[in-house]
């Protein structure tokens, strides 16, 4: 009896160790999506009244939990019954990440007037007393939850690829763990980010000169933090998405890994990142061009009809 108990405890410890290692690997691979998730969700809350920022973040967080409650069982079903579908789903997710990165850059540099018009329209709507702010808030929450569903699907797909071939309990533990860690981590950080300006304002009004200086520093740094998050998120899209595409083609993935090993840790690491980013940019540009051409083609058909 005692030996059986010890064997059982050893098996449990082994499983927990596997879960811990795989969770770390999955978290590392999904870190790029996390950066983009942070930037997008922090931007989604912009324009909301200060006293409503945290309730809006909490509402989106609850929507994110619902999204993952749908996606985790779906991923487990796919991993159990359709394991051959995991790699194509990862490739689709990687291509979508690259497309999102290119679309963001194109919108910023090629459609500056449209972006400025959108921001101006939102500011006028929030300043107009006749506008139903509750409806505006609900629209923002719905939009943020839709965005979260896409990003959550990418996170779960990447995690599923990491645990593919593992026992069902390990897959379940890692997927649930990643879902909880990413949701709590992202929205906890978003809540902190959107309240940075309030914290800075509070400190700047304290009597202490050190508190005032810290508060002014936070107020000055907050906009730059948002810009840095946006840039890091965009770069991560190409790095993570391109990396998925590179490793999805075994010959290319093995060739890059072999070159990186021969080149040394520093040069090899930078070189493999450069290859991932290059593949991501090219793939994103191709998908973006295809999407834009499809829009024009379908738009032309509708106008002819």
Image (tube, rainbow, N blue to C red):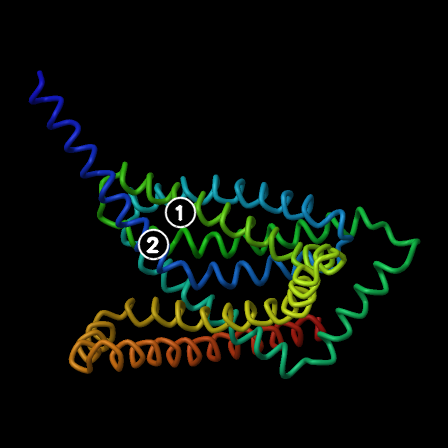
* Quadrant (top left, top right, bottom left, bottom right) of the N terminus: top left
| In-image side of 245 versus 124 (left or right) | left
- Residue depicted at x 60% and y 53%: 192
Residue wearing tag 1: 178
- Residue depicted at x 86% and y 65%: 124
Examine the image and state in which quarter residue 89 appears. bottom left
| In-image side of 153 versus 274 (left or right) | right
Along the viewing direction, whichever of 215 and 153 lies nearer the viewer: 215
* Quadrant (top left, top right, bottom left, bottom right) of the C terminus: bottom right
Callout 1–callout 2 Cβ contact below 8 Å = yes
- Neighbours of disc 1 within 10 Å: few (<14), some (14-19), many (20+): many
Count all numbered tags in the image, as a single digit. 2
Examine the image and state in which quarter residue 73 appears. top left
Residue wearing tag 2: 26
- Neighbours of disc 2 within 10 Å: few (<14), some (14-19), many (20+): many
Q: Residue at the front extreme?
A: 208
């Amino acid at each position: 009896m005692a030996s059986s108990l010890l064997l059982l405890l050893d098996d449990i410890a082994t499983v927990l160790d596997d879960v811990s290692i795989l969770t770390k690997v999955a978290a590392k691979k999904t870190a790029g999506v996390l950066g983009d998730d942070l930037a997008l969700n922090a931007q989604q809350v912009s324009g909301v009244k200060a006293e409503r920022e945290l309730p809006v973040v909490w509402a989106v967080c609850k929507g994110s939990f619902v999204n993952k409650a749908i996606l985790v069982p779906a991923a487990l079903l796919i991993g159990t019954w359709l394991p051959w579908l995991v790699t194509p789903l990862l490739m689709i997710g990687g291509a979508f990440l690259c497309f999102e990165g290119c679309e963001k850059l194109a919108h910023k540099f090629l459609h500056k007037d449209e972006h400025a018009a959108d921001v101006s329209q939102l500011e006028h709507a929030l300043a107009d007393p006749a506008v139903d702010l509750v409806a505006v808030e609900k629209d923002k929450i719905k939009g943020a939850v839709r965005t979260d569903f896409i990003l959550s699907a990418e996170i779960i797909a990447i995690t599923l690829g990491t645990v593919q071939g593992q026992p069902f309990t390990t897959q379940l533990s890692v997927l649930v763990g990643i879902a909880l860690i990413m949701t709590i981590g992202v929205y906890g950080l978003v809540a902190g980010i959107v309240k940075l300006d309030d914290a800075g304002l509070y400190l700047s009004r304290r009597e202490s000169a050190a508190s005032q200086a810290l508060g002014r520093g936070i107020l000055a740094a907050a906009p730059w933090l948002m810009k840095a998050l946006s840039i890091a998120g965009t770069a991560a899209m190409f790095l993570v998405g391109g990396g998925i595409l590179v490793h999805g083609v075994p010959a290319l993935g093995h060739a890059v890994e072999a070159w990186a090993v021969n080149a040394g840790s520093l040069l090899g690491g930078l070189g493999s990142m450069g290859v991932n980013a290059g593949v991501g940019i090219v793939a994103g540009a191709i998908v973006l061009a295809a999407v834009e051409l499809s829009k024009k083609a379908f738009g032309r058909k509708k106008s002819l009809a």
